[in-house]
Amino acid sequence: MLDKFINYFNLDFWVLWGLAAQSFFFLRLIIQWLRSEKEQKTIVPLSFWWLGILGALMLGVYAIVRRDLVFIITSLLQLVIYSRNFSIALKSRGQASIE
């Protein structure tokens, strides 16, 4: 039965890699949600951006291996946006500790 599942979905290293990358995207949302629940307000922790960057990098590698132009472009855009937001978050955090 497991063989049929593996063959049906063509599970190989790269599919598992892509699933792991998607897991980082999902995990960042769980972390953000739990933190917001704890604080009782919307919080976006730095780990949210770290996991987004890691997920975008991993999906970018997956997209390149699979030669999927849509995912390559999406991953590059995500990487730029998440990196910029991470940079802004770091600057904000540094300014908050100075004041």
Image (cartoon, rainbow, N blue to C red):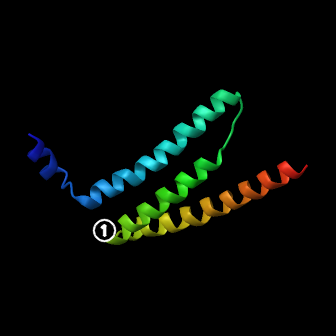
Picture quarter with the N terminus? top left
- In the rendered view, would you say 28 is above or below 60? above
Q: Position of residue 3 (x, y in %)?
A: 9, 47
Q: Residue at x 34, y 51 (%)?
A: 19
In the rendered image of this protein, does residue 58 appear above or below residue 4?
below
Q: Quadrant of residue 44?
A: top right
- Residue 95: image x %, image y %? 84, 54
Q: Which residue bears the numbered disc 1?
A: 66
Residue 51's x, y, as percent? 53, 52
**Amino acid, disc 1:** Arg
Residue 85 image-quadrant placement: bottom right
**Which residue reaches farthest right?**
99
State the residue at coordinates (28%, 56%). Answer: 15
Locate residue 82 relative to residue 57 in the image: left or right: right
- Please tell me whether mark 1 sits on a helix, a strand or a loop: helix
Total labels drawn: 1
Pick the residue in front: 76 or 53: 53
Q: Is residue 95 left or right of residue 55?
A: right
